Amino acid sequence: MVIADGILTPSMSVLSAVYGIKTKAGGLHEDYAILITCLILVGLFALQHIGTQRVGFLFTPIILVWLLSISGVGIYNIIHWNPRVVSALSPYYVYKLFKLTGKDGWTSLGGIVLCITGAEAMFADLGHFSQLSIRIAFTTIIYPSLILAYMGEAAYLSKHKEDLQRSFYRAIPEVVFWPVFIIATLATVVASQAVISATFSIISQCRALNCFPRVKIIHTSNQVHGQIYIPEVNWMLMVFCLLVVIGFRDTDMIANAYGLTVIIVMFVTTCLMFLVIVMVWKRNLLAAFIFVSVFGSLELLYLSSCLAKVAKGGWIPLIFSLVVSSVMYIWHYGTLQKQSFESHNKTSLDMLLSLGPNVGINRVRGIGLIYTNVLSGIPPMFSHFVTNFPAFHQVLIFVTFQFLTTPRVSVNQRFIVRRIGPPEFRIYRCIIRLGYKDARKDSHAFETDLIETVRVFLQRESDGGDARDSVSQMPVNQHESNRLRDDASTRYENGSGAGPETRRKRVRFCGVGSSKELEDLENAREAGLAYMMGNTCVLARETSSFVKKFVINIVYGFLRRNCRSPSTALGIPHTSLIEVGMAYRV
């Protein structure tokens, strides 16, 4: 729904602002208003690549002038048309509204909800500003300006009920109409910017948790990590916005869709806050229940009114959300099936090395980085490679990325190194832990950090230290902490790596052996690095159901072929990449 909000907010905001031209130019053809709206939307999305910080700096003066303008217009209308409208601040008139209008008052909530749109996207600003700055700006500038603007509009309507459809622009004094109109149009671009940024953030975090196909994520700021730009998503949002504007044209239908989207986002957020209060903040269950009851009941009242307008445009975000959710679920399901196949078809080191005398495995100079999702044993991709091409590098490092459910992992807690097999094999495993907001470095920086971590690992062994000391532990929670502590220990992996019979022994190494390993590591580093990863084709078994074949073979296969390749997403240089093709039957 947040992604749907990223489509509807620019469409609704810009189109409604441009339609204000008809207030002064009643003979203007609708097609010209649509054309102007499309040009503004194209310009808005074309600006995204320069980064949120620069765009925000450009538009900050505009939004300040806008807030001061609507405040001034509101004060003028209150004084000029109906000063008694200030009494509307009393909650008594909410009760009176429902008493007098009954069902019509409930129906009107679907339109009233548009007065609070934008509040659901404030969380997007947390990636760029502090909580305190947002609170100060909202309470001292934004909220008072909106109250004055709405009271002024109500004061005007109390004397000009015939202008209900264009009340905002009709209420602007003639002398300042065009300046306010221009500022209003620019302000809608600012409102759209926040939701577009929110869409980038949501998709980035979903991608990190394997719930969205791989896309290119560009960090536009060196100081603020939350400022990102996703080209594929940006242009797709632009296309959908243009389709909504050109296809519907009717601001009433788009408003119905927009209102339903916003109130669902708010209601789901309130429900999720129950989990945050209980599980993250560790507060009393009763306090969480009271919070959800108070805010949830208000939002349900608005939601029930908006649901009545599903047939009048509200179906747009529901269909879009269903499609996006299906894509995310299928991608996540297909990824889990692929990882499950690799986990169940891994081979043991002993089995691999026993092939050595039979197939004549040779060791070549250099370091081989083997990318895999398998945390123990040898991935099927590498076994497939060795049995068909019996040679691998002098130093092997199996690299696995683990994305944790925490935002960030500090640099000194990011790498876990352990040994595979006896020291003379020169085979290691490195688990790299990243939070869903962590940015991956370029290949050169990554190589430097990884090899330095292995060197420190061997150096501590050479100095007679316990290998357990070579990795810091991050206490995410007790269960996670225990698991990571076990992973972090230096292990000698032997026996079958495919099941619970795997035999691991803690090993302490003498200084001479580790010194020789350090020398071999430096020599291999000078010889160069090569990257190896699987280029897998995931297919459903012949005995699978039609639904699974459709999901895996067609939908998931289409997504894999059309998203960014793993090597590109990981920043692996093409000239040093070895891809091993395999077909997985899941």
Image (cartoon, rainbow, N blue to C red):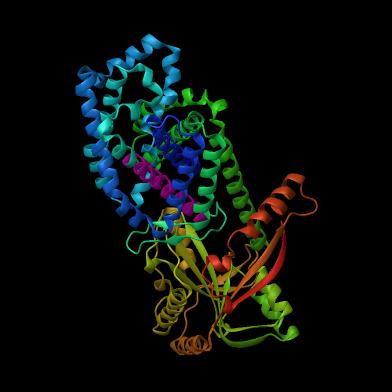
Residue 144 seen in the current view: no
Viewer-nearest residue: 129 or 333: 129
Q: Residue at x 61, y 88 (%)?
A: 364
Q: Residue at x 47, y 82 (%)?
A: 509
Question: What range is drawn magenta here?
Answer: 183-209
* Helix, strand or loop for the magenta stretch, by majority: helix
Q: Looking at the picture, how far across and down is residue 119, in whole percent? A: 36, 37
Residue lying furthest right in this view?
542
In the rendered structure, the answer to whether residue 272 lies left or right of residue 213 reads: left
In the rendered structure, the answer to whether residue 208 lies left or right of residue 359 reads: left
Question: Is 62 one of the magenta-colored residues?
Answer: no
**Please, is residue 356 above or below residue 467 in the view?**
below
Q: Looking at the picture, how far across and down is residue 20, in whole percent? A: 39, 33
Residue 349 seen in the current view: yes
Viewer-nearest residue: 579 or 58: 58
**Please, is residue 100 above or below residue 456 in the view?**
above
Quarter of the image where one finds residue 21: top left
Q: Looking at the picture, how far across and down is residue 30, in whole percent? A: 50, 34
Q: Quadrant of the C terminus?
A: bottom right
